Amino acid sequence: MPDSWNIKLSSAGGVGVSVILVEGGVPLMGKVRIKGAKNAVLPIMAASLLSAEKVVLEEVPDLEDVRTMSRLLRHLGVEVFYDCSSERLVLQARRIMTCTAPYGPVRRMRASILIIGPLLARMGRARISLPGGCAIGSRPIDLHLKGLAAMGASFTMKNGYIEASAPKLRGANICLDYPSVGATENLLMAAALAEGPTTIENAAAEPDVVDLAAFIDMLGAKVRGAGTPRISVHPVASPGGGKHRVIPDRIEAGTLMVAAAITGGDVLLENVISRHLTAVTAKLRECGVHVDESPDSLRVVARGRSRAVELKTMPYPGFPTDLQPQFMALLSLARGTSVIAETVFERRYLHVPSLQRMGARIHLEGRSAIITGLPALQGATVHAPDLRGGAALLLAALAARGVSEIHGVRHIRRGYSRLTSRLRALGGRIYMG
């Protein structure tokens, strides 16, 4: 298979593309199938370290972040095979060759921190460079380390690396200070092989956490309460393998819902879990956008300008911070004045200067943004500052008058698989520079 990663792991689709040109003003029409969730597949890939048996993941999107995690797992000794055409990923960690995750792959992706829990659980040690990712806020890892310390792990910081050790993790009762998704996931994985049961209070309830719990269940541990603030884990002595289907990506779905709304389009989204998008659907309806929903599909129909709304980002099931930039682009064209309160990440407004270059009237006050809607935005040359900010600029360009030139598109490739070609299939006028 010429496009499989076992032959050409270092080649990412469109890696040579550095600029996207967008001619705006065309309503998006048609249907699109949502890919598997980036934020679910990355922790599940890390969880493959828990078992020596083969695991097969289906609905794995071809993303830069998935490729980065694959390189990291290969460095640790995991056998990795990915078929791009079927979106099927096979992993087997027969032997862990090293417990050190180097600076190279880790600096590109914050999800790299998720290997600490499974490495500690299986090998009793881990050494990882401090993680990178989008520069949208401090996103401290203290909750990860505090929870693992409660299970018996000890940590030192040396030469830019976190060095962790634990001869044998012990089950514990852990209460998180904040429902951190990453900390919940790391503790879930660590608890799967610990001695005795673990309870996590104030756990994150995101669908991605629930999907990871289902995968850990498949390996043989017993996870109860995933999707609620209290999760319990009964460990397994000899984890097995199996096949797991990754849930659809609610953030990709929300991005495409906003794409339909901002262009005045009519788009059917297939392969969604509608209940994962309740907050997004409610806010779009408040904007005046028509949304028809069934359990596994959504149809978004927009006619005329949206209405201004107030929006506050919150942990799930609240409105997701990962869709705040996209909604800001939509509200830049709404009738009236909108207010966004960003409560999750303190630097999640890096996309604002580029939207302002396109004419958007946005005023920042601390963690709040006040948006006065305009009838139209103007095409401009802009730079994607991060993953979701880049998606927001792409949506704004689809609705703007004239041509926009978007740089920094590598950020978009981190979290969206072939997004530009899929938008073209809906009628978007997008060209690669």
Image (tube, rainbow, N blue to C red):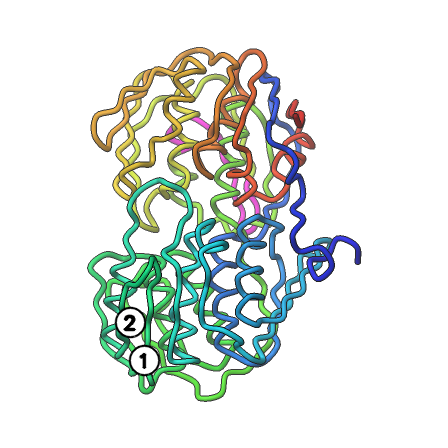
Would residue 411 be counted in the magenta stretch?
no
Q: Residue at x 60, y 21 (%)?
A: 22
Q: Is residue 269 left or right of residue 233?
A: right
Cα gap from disc 1 to disc 2, whole angstroms? 9 Å
Q: Residue at x 62, y 57 (%)?
A: 59
Would residue 293 be counted in the magenta stretch?
yes
- As helix, strand or loop, the secondary structure at mark 2 comes to helix
Q: Residue at x 28, y 53 (%)?
A: 140
Quadrant containing the N terminus is bottom right
**What percent of the width, then of the height, locates residue 181?**
35, 57
Quadrant containing the C terminus is top right
Residue 167 occupies which quadrant of the picture? bottom left
- Disc number placed over residue 61 in the picture, else none: none
Q: What residue span does the magenta drawing correspond to?
A: 284-298
- Disc number placed over residue 166 in the picture, else none: 1
Q: Residue furthest right?
A: 1
**What percent of the width, then of the height, locates residue 363?**
27, 20
Residue bearing mark 2: 148
Residue 20 occupies which quadrant of the picture? top right
Badge 2 amino acid? Leu
Residue 91 occupies which quadrant of the picture? bottom right
Q: Is residue 22 left or right of residue 334?
A: right
Q: Are there few (<14), some (14-19), or many (20+) residues within 10 Å of tag 1?
A: many
Badge 1 amino acid? Ala
Q: Residue furthest front?
A: 159
Q: Residue at x 40, y 12 (%)?
A: 374
Task: Say which of 248 and 419 sits in front.
Answer: 419
Tags 1 and 2 in contact by the CB under 8 Å rule?
yes
341 up-or-down from 5: above or below: above
Give the mark nearer the N terminus: 1 vs 2. Answer: 2
